[in-house]
Image: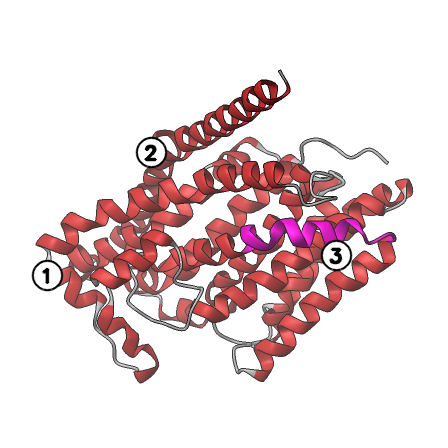
Amino acid sequence: MPRARSIPSLTGVRGVAALWVFMTHFYGLAADMLHQPWLMNSLFLFNGFRGVDLFFVLSGFILMHVHEGQFAQLRWPVIRDFFIVRFFRVYPLNTFVLLALVPLVLFAPGYVAMQRHYTDPAFAYRAHNLSVPGFIQTLLLVQSWTVLKLGEWNIVSWTLSAEVLGYIVFPLLAMMAMRVASMRSALALCVASLVTLVAILFACHHANNNPTGTFGAIRMFFCFAAGIMLYRAYHLAPEGTARYGAAITVGAVAFIAATLFFPVLPVCDVFGFAALVFGLAYQRGAINAFLCSGPVMWLGRISFSFYLTHYLIIGILSWAMGEWLRSLGFVGGMMATIAIFAVCLLAGVACYHLVERPSQRLGRRVMQRVEAHDALTGAQRTA
């Protein structure tokens, strides 16, 4: 059956996921500013890092939605165009944010010292943070590709590194997915991918924490592959499936919420994320309507820029003003909390309009010029 060209709620849910990740990075400072230590025990706030897994599932699903049919066979021009667009999607903004950090690193030794401080041997690699090798690794977005820990600059960029790996394998995974002929088989492969991920997380004692680096690439692969197969299931689903869309969405949200009452169960949220994306694809119900609302859609559009800058802003403000922020009373702390959130949003808006959108337009122009050059070369050869 024909599918919708646009699924607005998937943009909205991306904004919600970015906001959840922001919360998990901010709630420690917020608890101190508000003098509310109980916030540190919130499973909802602690598990915000799982929004990254939702990003990965979404990425696989949306890429299949956009490029459906293009990779039924692997053809170099199509693969090349895909890589060009994807390159301009992630590298320019990552490079801009990275270069913006350089003056701070060069002229604020106190900030560098804070970033290199660690008290737990498990985080000893932080002693190399903001190093030259770490800069090169982050600039190239290869920090998730090996076990080398050369030092972080913008810690959230590990997800971009993992995502780039996903882009590299996408054409092959998409071709394999196109060969799945039934909805049941596609769903089974989606579930199998997520079951494998959860089993690995439990076996490696990562069920209740946020593994990054090379292990982050493992998280990406299984969530990304699940998203690809989920879209194939959506594509193959009978027309009547749409009437269950709202119920699937509500069930997914209820499942995710229920896991947050138990310390270890949130590792299973990846199943809820997959069900949520599948249900939202049918654009039915109140949750879908909420995610399509103006403010949520706006947050979804700037979510990539907001995601990539918020952690740095929180860290810089904590370093520069942390003692003063923690001395505020409840009212002052609440005002500071709102102000910091607003600053992070403003940074996201600025990067979205000044870097992210222009770089995407540039990527499309580059792709069009390459295609035009190919067409001209082909015409000359046949003349």
Residue at label 1? 109
Badge number at residue 206: none
Q: Over which residues does the magenta segment extend?
A: 166-182
Residue at label 2? 350
Residue 258 in magenta? Answer: no
Instruction: Name the residue rendered at 15%, 67% in the picture.
Output: 113
Looking at the image, residue 11 sits to the left or right of residue 140; the answer is right
Q: What is the CA distance from the residue labelled 3 to the residue labelled 1?
A: 50 Å
Camera-side residue of 63 and 4? 63
Camera-side residue of 35 and 212? 212
**Along the polypeptide, which appears first: circle 3 or circle 1?**
1
Which amino acid does the dot numbered 1 rest on? Pro
Which amino acid does the dot numbered 3 rest on? Gly
Instruction: Name the residue rendered at 58%, 39% in the picture.
Output: 11
Res 73 seen here: yes
Camera-side residue of 334 and 261? 261
Residue at label 3? 251
Q: Are marks 2 and 1 in contact (CB under 8 Å)?
A: no
| Residue 37 percent across, percent down from the top left | 36, 70
Task: Decide: is 25 above or below 279.
Answer: below
Q: Nearer the viewer, mark 3 or mark 2?
A: 2
